[in-house]
Amino acid sequence: MTEAVSGSTAATSADVARARAEIALSLPTPLVELWEVTDGLMTDAGVTVYAAECIGERNSTYEVAQYAPGFVLIGDNSGGRGFLLRADGSDSAVFSSDLGDLAPDDFEVEALDFASWIESLGSEHFR
């Protein structure tokens, strides 16, 4: 699905378990599968997929459970736009939203599935 980020290792099972506990929702399977390869990533353009160790804090900070129940904030574009997956779907589309407006009615579809979205980022641009 992607190449490991330079210097990055896979998330540990303890990191994933802690992330599950902090989110208090099912973690999307494609995200966990990415973490088995690399614990988060960042592209040259600033698109970030959060590491297991910080996903709980990011979801808490942006109050995702309150404003977008059933979704998990999985990353951002380093410019105020977040990327989300449905927590209950293993084949969820990737959605984006302004981080100041996490109303699901305003979400935009970035890709029909996580793997396609990761591929669209272009692994040659990963840091």
Image: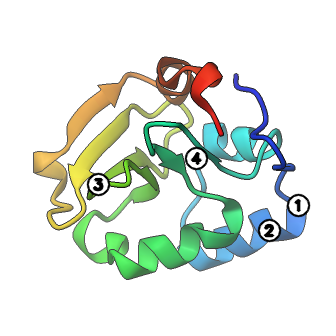
In this figure, which residue is indicated by the disc labeled 3?
79
- Horizontal side of residue 112 vs 36, given as left or right: left
| x 54%, y 27%: residue | 118
Query: Please, is residue 101 above or below residue 81 in the view?
Result: below
* Label disc, if present, on residue 22 of the rendered structure: none
- Amino acid type of the residue that numbered disc 2 sits on in the rendered structure: Asp
Task: Give the label, 1 or 3, closer to the camera.
Answer: 3
| x 47%, y 72%: residue | 58
- Spatial CA distance of label 4 from label 3 is 24 Å
Upstream in sequence: badge 1 or badge 3:
1
SS class, disc 4? loop
In this figure, which residue is indicated by the disc labeled 1?
12
Task: Give the label, 2 or 4, closer to the camera.
Answer: 2
| x 47%, y 19%: residue | 120
SS class, disc 1? loop
Upstream in sequence: badge 4 or badge 1:
1
In this figure, which residue is indicated by the disc labeled 4?
28
Residue 45 image point, x, y percent: 43, 37
- Amino acid type of the residue that numbered disc 3 sits on in the rendered structure: Gly
Question: In the image shown, does 107 or 37 lie closer to the viewer?
Answer: 37
SS class, disc 3? loop
Upstream in sequence: badge 2 or badge 3:
2
Q: Image quadrant for the N terminus?
A: top right
Task: Give the label, 2 or 3, closer to the camera.
Answer: 3
- Horizontal side of residue 25 vs 105, given as left or right: right
Which residue is outermost to the left? 106
